[in-house]
Image (cartoon, coloured by chain):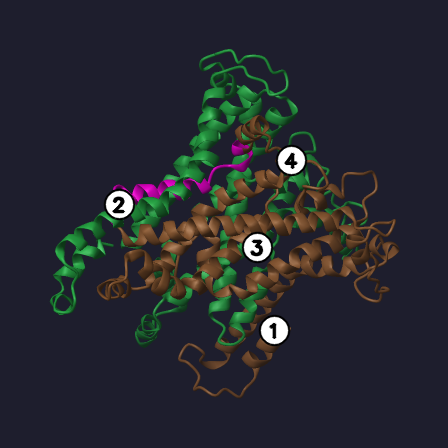
Amino acid sequence: MSDPAPATTDRPGQVASATPPAPGRSRRRLSDRGLAVVFISPALLLLLGMSVFPLLWALYLSFTDYSATRGGPARFVGFGNYTAILTSAQVHQRALTTLIYVVGAVTLQTVLGFTIAYLISRRTHGRGLLTTLFLVPMMLSPVVVGLFWRFMLDAQFGVINSMLGSLGLGQVEWLTRQRTALVSLIMVDTWQWTPFIMLIALAGLTAVPRYLYEAASIDRASEWFRFRTITLPLVWPLLLIAVLFRAIEAFRLFDLVYILTSGGPGVSTETLSFHVYKVAFLGFNTGTASAYGILMVLVVIVLTQLYLRYLNKLKEG
Amino acid sequence: MAVSVDKAVAAGPARDRPPRVRRRGGRGRGRSLLEVVLLTVLAVVMLFPVLWMIETSIKENRDVYAIPAEFIGFTVTLDHFKDVFVAGDGGRSALSVAFLNSVVVAGVSTVLATVLGVPAAWAYSRFTLRAKKDQLFFILSTRFMPPVVVVVPIFLMYRQVGLIDTKLGLILIYAAFNVPFTIWMMKGFVDEVPAEYEDAAMLDGYTRLQAFWKFTLPLLVPGIAATAVFALIFSWNEFVFAIFLTSSDSVRTAPPAIAGLIGGTTVDWGLVAAASVVFALPVLVFAYLVRRHLVAGVTLGAVRR
């Protein structure tokens, strides 16, 4: 990705044709910079206005006791909000819930998604159509997914309990019991996002060169040996990207919780995102919510850095 | 269905190609059958909720709540779909207004993100800039911010400047969330167009801007279309900003409007299902159109094959 302008003059074949005179060239290089600024700055300005500025404002508010409803001037409280959040037992509980949810959902998705991708990659026919069908859940809005699963998991007339009933199994109160609610949330998220892992794993699996397998089968290597020494090492980097991506997304998740359980019953499915919302929009402690949010942003930044650094390594390697 | 076709082909004895080495003997075929069965089961599990949603949307209310659930043999009705678009008094329903708002908000924000993002992507691809990599990473990381966190200061900001409960407010925030995606996705497409085309055009006396406009841009049209479709889907499906930044029926987009259907004491699940089908159908059609770019699209342009 070097600057193409000087490269042009270095090429003998092109110098021979009508090259513009020197003054024109220097002016053009100047206008190249101008063009870059003109092309890039509107996009950056929008990002500064709608992402960076709000975050800086939140950073400022996080050191105050400002409340969006009470109004009045914001009083500076130093790190008070931060210490309050970091020492709060409520927050610790939400962090644990979030951790269980993120680890549970992402693990399940990875195992299932990779299995499906592996099975599809071994088919020779109908691959395209199968992939397309499997991808449907991922394209749906979380609102649609949440609403619909809420209907299907309904304890009285939900289709899941109805099917369990006709199999002679007991009824489960999916969304109204403390313990099952989080499991249901993980299940629904897994249903929606398994296709994501599948799609990326499939991209990795189809990129594995065929000749490697052929060489291995000449050596009479066992199936498991081939999987462990060829397939997995080659797909693993891409799979890790997908897993990190999903982990960030799961950590930010809000809409599915909001629709499916509203954090309940009790606080059993309240993730950190949902708790921030409650503090900000139901408790109206804008200052505290901002500090809470900034802490979450820090976690996201760490995860994103990990993701991007890894992505960069993958691209260069 | 595809799976059954697949199964028939895989199990069938007649194969055009000579059997591969690993498919030797009865054990290999047995395993292959097991794999097909497993795949079929997984496909049914993944697709069942979607089919159930479609079924619910064409059932009469008494069938919707039937215990045990009715899978086949119910009376088909399109009443729920009528209710999605037509209000009880014959006028336009609140849902249909919301759908229209969604079209406007998603459409305009996508156009805005494309107009801002494509030139930036081209510039990032073609020019050496200071700390280019850092700039690109910064741009992508803004996309990863938790919406619930961003919405608090955005809410206060909008309240200050009067953008609360306006379509313009939603359009701006959606555009801001789609610009990072557009830049990353489009940069990949621009990288694939050789810079030499522009160099050659400039030797013919065109300025760089003309070279971009006349030679590179036409080649980017398929990429731009795919990128725009993804941006459209993101905005169309978005819920968090929509529910916190808008409240009135005339501004609200479809996701909060559909979610609002379950607010009351009784829930008309037939209507919810019909509204969800109407809402999801365009997304699926669009996603099918850009299926070749799905890997890049869903990873925000970060992973390309």
Q: Considering only order in the chain, which callout, 4 or 1, is on the residue closer to the N terminus?
A: 1
Tell me if residue B198 comes above or below residue A126 in the rendering. above
Which residue is found at the position 60% from the left and 47% from the top? B105
Q: Which residue is mark 3?
A: A138
Question: What is the CA distance from the residue labelled 1 to the residue labelled 4?
Answer: 45 Å
**Chain shown in brown:** B
Question: What is the CA distance from the residue labelled 2 to the residue labelled 1?
Answer: 50 Å
**Residue B156 magenta-drawn?**
no
Query: Could you tell whether A3 is left or right of A121 in the image?
Result: left
Q: Position of residue A226 (x, y in %)?
A: 36, 66
Which residue is found at the position 43% from the left and 46% from the top? B180
Question: What is the CA distance from the residue labelled 3 to the residue labelled 2?
Answer: 37 Å
- Tag nearer the camera, 4 or 3: 4
* Element type where label 1 sits in the image: helix
- Tag nearer the camera, 2 or 1: 2
Amino acid under disc 4: Asp
Q: Which mark is residue B129?
A: 2
Which residue is found at the position 38% from the left and 66% from the top? A207
Q: Position of residue A101 (x, y in %)?
A: 55, 40
Which residue is found at the position 32% from the left and 71% from the top? A216
**What tint does the image give chain A?**
green
